[in-house]
Amino acid sequence: MCEESKKRVLSCIQPSGMLTLGNYLGALKNWLNMQDEFETTFAVADLHAITVRQEPAKLRSQIYSTYALMLALGLDPERSTMFIQSHVPEHAQLAWILSCNTQFGEMARMTQFKDKSAKHADNINVGLFSYPVLMAADILLYKPDYVPVGADQKQHLEIARDIAIRFNRLYGDVFTIPDAYIPKTGARVMSLQDPEKKMSKSDENLNSWVAILDDKDTIIRKFKRAVTDSEGGIYVSEDKKGISNLITIYSAITGKTSAEVENEFSGKGYGDFKLAVGEVVADELGPIKQRYDQIITDKAELERLFREGAERAERVARKTYFKAMKKVGFVL
Ligand code: TYM
């Protein structure tokens, strides 16, 4: 397919600590699958990370490790533009213009803002409030057709579309209206300890989430301890959230439908099933960890790659940003 005719894809991930199996199945695995068919741009969203308080030295190391993990997954800086958000100043600059075209009421109804401000009641900062506007800028600068994300980001995608539609109507066409690309299986991986809650690295119960970089024994142990129910059957049901979550994970990794998984384990016990899920997850993540362990040792190479990525990204971002500047009446 010729470069010109490829549709565009963009997504970002926060460098907030260890990335989880939820990040992998909800987003990263799709990024990789889209790399061949689309023109892809991926960023480490460090500007977003400081909406909650971060320890600077730790944040710095997490930015390197998130970028290294993207490489370890198989994302290829030759084929994808891969950079660090703060290296391309147009993100923050466009966010300002968009902020002045976004209503307070629109931000106030974002569920993630409500959740996060409840969790960080001592630091309900303005950045946390206007975070979706920055995310809209991340997206709109690169004119993507699709944005691969997990289900928790759907509301933010919708607001990005609303902002773009309104801007285009007021000032003339600048932005492409993006569609969310949410996987059919794995869009919402739940906690292994409380399947009512999303799997999240900020969960204090370490058994509730699997890190992409966990070793095999740890992964298997966490799955063995996964909370299920006492009924016994292995099938998807509203009343069996724990087992349903494990079936989703197994399906997302193996590509089997949930009916096929139910068949495969019909008559088997929870113990066998949990072990099987742990094993397929560990087998999938193991090679990523191996590559990561090597890549993270070469800091100079990482720096070379993310600097080059930022230059490439900025060439695209600057064009869109200048266009938006002109449309609102700024002088170039
Ligand atoms: P973040 O960093 O929290 O998560 C990165 C991606 O992982 C997905 N995800 C999940 N998917 C399924 N199950 C889960 N338990 C799970 N947990 C996380 C998220 O949906 C996301 O796709 N605001 C974004 C980062 C961002 C962004 C952007 C994304 C900044 N700018 C522009 C797309 C486009 C975030 O905090 O994701």
Image (cartoon, rainbow, N blue to C red):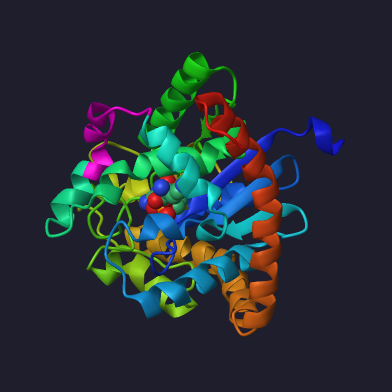
Q: Is residue 52 above or below residue 222?
A: above
Q: Residue at x 80, y 30 (%)?
A: 5
Outermost residue toward the front in this view: 331
Residue drawn at x 74%, y 40% is 37
Placement of 204 over or under 238, stated as above or below: below
Counting every numbered tag in the picture gives: 0
Up/down of 306 relative to 169, above or below: below
Residue 274: image location, x then y, percent: 38, 62
Q: Residue farthest to the top?
A: 169
Q: Nearer the viewer, residue 154 or 205?
A: 154
- Where on the picture, by quarter, is residue 286? bottom right
Please state, as top left, top right, bottom left or bottom right, where the C terminus lies in the image: top right
Query: 265 left or right of 237?
Result: right
Please state which of residues 28 and 2 is positioned toward the viewer in this rendering: 2
Range of magenta residues? 101-113
Residue 246 at least partly seen: no
Q: Nearer the viewer, residue 203 or 132?
A: 132
Could you say where residue 138 lies in the image, as x and y percent from the top left? 51, 44
Within the magenta stretch, is there residue 70? no
Location of residue 263 in the rendering, given as x and y in whole percent from the top left corner? 48, 43
Q: Residue at x 19, y 42 (%)?
A: 114
Say whether residue 208 is left or right of residue 45.
Answer: left
Residue 130: which quarter of the image?
A: top left
Pick out the residue farthest to the bottom: 297
Would residue 239 be visible to someone looking at this image? Answer: yes
